[in-house]
Amino acid sequence: MRMVILDRDGVINYDSEKFIKSPDEWLPIPGSLEAIARLSQSGFRVVLASNQSGVGRGLLDMTTLNKIHDKLYRAVGLAGGRIDAFFYCPHTQMANCDCRKPKTGMFREIAERFNISLEKVPAIGDSLRDLQAASKAGALPILVRTGKGEKTLSEGNIPSETLVFSELGEATKYLIEQIK
């Protein structure tokens, strides 16, 4: 089974310092929906793994988070793709949970749920914690320069095996070419 793990904010949609708190605030980065469609059509299972501490902070409730995700699912579907699963951590950093990236709880849950090893499974994110979680889980960390990506790259200390691409579409092209 081919799988790719994507972070949400900054990879698929524009990020916000004030959190994405409503479906109206969720705006896709140009080309990201089409990139997900290409991954789906090329046989990849597309799984999202995202910290969503806005829930734990009381900035949005689960109903609103589900409405945001419904908008995301519909938009990906209209582009010809699909998202096979969405894993998220609703906790704040102070909760010290195991699921919040850079910890690997979400990644372990993905491996268990899909009954696969995450060894070299591409995991695409825009922040250091995305890359650290992927690396610790044995996945292949991929940084995109959208969202916080440029800042993450300039600050350094990214895992040595990290691949870097300008945006999700470029990373998708690379991944699809690797399976041919």
Image: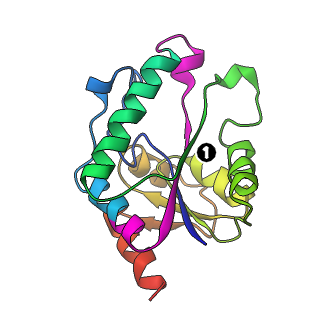
Q: Nearer the viewer, residue 90 or 75?
A: 75
- Residue drawn at point x = 25 percent, y = 55 percent: 79
Residue 7 lies, in percent from the top left, at: 50, 47
Q: Locate the N terminus by quadrant.
A: bottom right
Residue 163 lies, in percent from the top left, at: 51, 69
Question: Of all residues shown, which one is farthest toward the bottom?
Answer: 180
Question: Of all residues shown, which one is farthest toward the top?
Answer: 58
Q: Is residue 173 above or below residue 77?
A: below
Q: Is residue 112 above or below residue 49?
A: below
As for residue 48 lying within the magenta part, the answer is yes
Q: Nearer the viewer, residue 143 or 106?
A: 106
- Determine which quarter of the picture holds residue 34: bottom left
- Residue drawn at point x = 72 percent, y = 57 percent: 111
Residue 167 lies, in percent from the top left, at: 34, 59
| 132 relative position to 179: left or right | right
Magenta stretch, residue numbers: 38-60
Q: Is residue 83 above or below residue 50?
A: below
Whether residue 23 can be seen here: yes
Q: Locate the C terminus by quadrant.
A: bottom left
User: Which structural element holds mark 1?
Assistant: helix
Instruction: Report the residue marked by disc 1.
Output: 129
Q: Nearer the viewer, residue 79 or 100?
A: 79
Q: Amino acid at mark 1?
A: Arg
